[in-house]
Amino acid sequence: MAKRDLYEILGVNRDASEDEMKKAYRKLAMKYHPDRNPDNKEAEEKFKEAKEAYEILTDANKRAAYDRYGHAGVDQSMGGGGGGGQGFDGFADAFGDIFGDIFGGGGGGRGRSNVYRGADLRYNLEISLEEAARGAEKTIRIPALEECDSCHGSGAKPGTQPKTCPTCGGAGQVRIQQGFFSIQQTCPKCHGSGRVIPEPCTSCGGAGRVKRQKTLEVKIPAGIDDGMRLRHSGHGEPGVNGGPSGDLYVEIHIKQHPVFQRDGDDLHCEMPISFSTAALGGEIEIPTLDGAANIRIPAETQSAKVFRLRGKGIRNVRSHAPGDLMVHVVVETPVKLTDRQKELLREFEEIAAGNAERHNPKAKSWMDKVKDFFSA
């Protein structure tokens, strides 16, 4: 029976790179692996066929011979992994990273121990609107794992030393037989460290690290907004077995301000004015983040009128372009009137009622709309 083309078996072009062949082989291995297809002879044969094709085509000498002479050029070198080929080790390296998916193990390539990056941490920092606008420096305290003073990080009781793991011989990996081939997995006794601690340190429980509070200076840039995060590399939890530390993310929360409401880079505030100022006009003083400012209120200003003060908002944290301050005017109705004030207002109302269309155009227009609605 004629053998299939090796490139066709892997489903790659003849000029495919080693990485492309490795990816193709992994897909086939996951699909046809005997443990995923029990008692399926056809799947087992396809698995062996793909393995054989991968071992030949990822060996430079064998691939050259196959490209020139076909199967006749590699027949003598097939089956044992000899002749300078990758053999079982090359197969294991290509297939090692999917052992965990098949067996639930967490296997890996040769000589790898469980080196993990530390977890990231988050710290919620509350600041005032003024600090967000101008920038600030804050001192925070965060929990941190530091080297144990008693064992100096070894995890062993003072006067004792960690010993080489008897299960893996210090390699951190053990080889396990799975059917007709074997795989490497993390050592279950030392968890990949390659050593065990017969007498753990009483101060840290054998971890070699203890939890303490660490002080950190946080520089808050001007213009930062609520919900933004500042990243401090390497200030998260320490890594495992020499892995890098995680990062610390400081998340900003801005306190509610008694005067201003923030909308992006703009600020909004309400400014109550008296009935007479709204009617006659005048100048009023308003607050800004940079101090007081004066604005001119024109005569006959209506409630809810908005005055824009350009550049009096917050500078953008990236572009540094300033936002604006929006002043919302609220005409305040006078309260606790004296008898004389009430008398003057009644007199004013009588005079205004004689020419309502001129003095109260909005009220006149609204009443006309109401009449039209009910007469329709």
Image: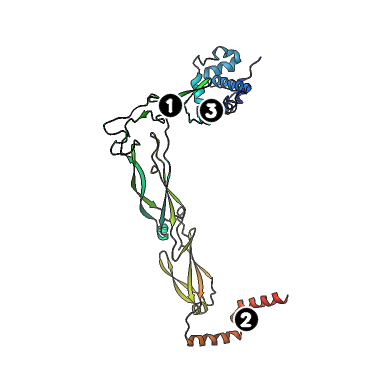
Give the quarter of the image for residue 167: top left
**Is residue 242 found left or right of 78 in the rendered image?**
left
**Is residue 50 found left or right of 196 in the rendered image?**
right
Q: Is residue 360 above or below residue 310?
A: below
Percent of width and height locating residue 268: 49, 64
Q: Count numbered badges in the picture.
A: 3
Q: Amino acid at mark 1?
A: Gln
Give the quarter of the image for residue 259: bottom left
Q: Secondary structure at mark 1?
A: strand
Mark 3: give few (<14), some (14-19) or many (20+) Cα within 10 Å: few
The residue beneath circle 2 is 357
Q: Amino acid at mark 3?
A: Asp
Q: Nearer the viewer, residue 54 or 314?
A: 54
Instruction: Name, please, the residue furthest toward the left.
Output: 159
Residue 317's disc is: none
Q: Is residue 223 visible?
A: no
The residue beneath circle 1 is 173
Q: Earlier in the sequence, mark 3 or mark 2?
A: 3
The residue beneath circle 3 is 19
Q: Nearer the viewer, mark 2 or mark 1?
A: 1
Q: Secondary structure at mark 3?
A: helix
Percent of width and height locating residue 42: 63, 22
Q: Earlier in the sequence, mark 2 or mark 1?
A: 1
Instruction: Name, please, the residue furthest toward the top.
Output: 76
Q: Amino acid at mark 2?
A: Glu
At 51% from the left and 71% from the top, the residue drawn is: 329
Q: Secondary structure at mark 2?
A: helix
Percent of width and height locating residue 362: 61, 76
